[in-house]
Image (cartoon, rainbow, N blue to C red):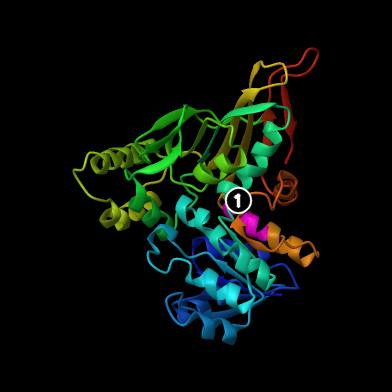
Amino acid sequence: MRVLIVGGYGTFGGRIVELLESEKALSLIVAGRSLTSAKQYCAGRGKTAALLMAAQFDRDGDLASQLAFLGPDLVVDASGPFQAYGDGAYRLVEACVAARIHYLDLADGSAFVDGVAAYDERARDSGIYALSGVSSFPVLTAAVVRKLAAPLARVDEISGGIAPSPFAGVGENVVRAIASYAGQPVAYLGRTAKVIGRPFTQQRRYTIAPPGRLPLRNTMFSLVDVPDLRVLSQLWPQAKRVWMGAGPVPEILHRALIFCAWLVNLGIVRTLSPLAPLMHWATNKLRWGEHRGGMFVEVKGAGADGVTQKHSWHLLAEGSDGPLIPSMAVQAIVLKHLAGAPPRVGARACVDDLELEDYERLFASRTIYGGFRRPPRTGALLYGAHPW
């Protein structure tokens, strides 16, 4: 199976290569605008079971001819920032559908991921799948919410957050995306109706504490623009609130970003995009704290008896394993495809193509641990844990 990874030598693309390079059945085409960078990256990986090939690929160029030349079975767009694609944002999706090539992307923008569904009929006619948002937000969150909501008769609120290790390493395109939307209006479900929020101007504190593990320090999370704000409300339309946040550390840098987001919100500055290079430098140079990251998902609702319940799931990743989690959804889908169980054809947000068990199999060999916290039952333990 030939897999073209656009942005393959970047932060997320490189992690996808790292996760898939042990598969003999794969030929990984590591591509980007710089052929030299692609060659250097492939050479640096050493001997791998998968065949690694470097290629030049310009997503703003003639896509049809580039795809025909490289001949992939699957394209993974790990470039971004997807919020900045502007006109022709879906050119690569369209080219893959026309060429009957499967497509995945790691888009983190709610509008981009939501818009991929417009190509559903064409993708089904072409016999291919085109999945957007193939990352922790919303793939893992949706899989967890399905587990948390199972005992509930009604889902009222869904919330979650990711707290990366300060040593995780943040890619330039991720920072550019954050700078582009911080303080800008974004629609999400409030407690009573759809409201317009401003990313990084709304906060909450939360302690990520998987049962049986040392919890992370209490973390401040800020609202972020992720696909979950739209797609989770479509999956659980009865929910009155969907809120997702990020908890970057050190907190002093997080507070500086909050201050800048308020400058945008108040109209003092138009956008933080010009600050993206400085933000990228600060995020990757001013680092201290524990080398651990985590994630939580919380669902509030009511059981069949009408009694309000709160269920939560907590994830802890030690050391350098945490940064791999956003790319593991791509790994899981590719492995399932190789095993003869590809996603169903069509174009959509990737919210029901993987289950928590698919992640469990990948977490098992790493220092990644998770567990559920549920309301106590008579004669039962308060916590139920999954040792991952």
Task: Tell me: residue 118, above or below residue 100.
Answer: above
Percent from the top left, x then y, of residue 263? 23, 41
User: Is 317 positioned to the left or the right of 166 in the image?
Assistant: right
Residue 128 seen in the figure: no
Residue tagged 1: 325
Image-based side of 369 in relation to 137, left or right: right
- Residue 352: x and y in percent read 67, 49
For residue 105, what is the image quadrant? Answer: bottom right
Q: Relative to 288, say whether 63 is above or below.
A: below
Q: Main secondary structure of the magenta part?
A: helix
Residue at horizontal 62 percent and vertical 49 percent from the top: 139
Give SS at disc 1.
helix
Q: Residue at the top extreme?
A: 378
Q: Residue at x 58, y 35 (%)?
A: 296
| Image mark count | 1
Relative to residue 385, is residue 179 depicted above or below?
Answer: below
Q: Residue at x 64, y 31 (%)?
A: 210
> Which quadrant, please, contains the C terminus?
top right
Q: Position of residue 363 (x, y in %)?
A: 70, 48
Where in the figure is residue 228, as x and y percent of width and height?
A: 53, 44
Nearer to us in this view, 125 or 195: 125
Quadrant of the image containing the N terminus: bottom right
Question: Over which residues does the magenta segment extend?
Answer: 324-331
Judge by depth and name the residue closer to the eye, 199 or 28.
Answer: 199
Amino acid, disc 1: Ile
Whether residue 177 is visible, yes or no, is yes
Q: Is residue 303 magenta?
A: no
- Label 1 CA crowd tier, 10 Å (few <14, some 14–19, many 20+): many
Q: Residue furthest left?
A: 268
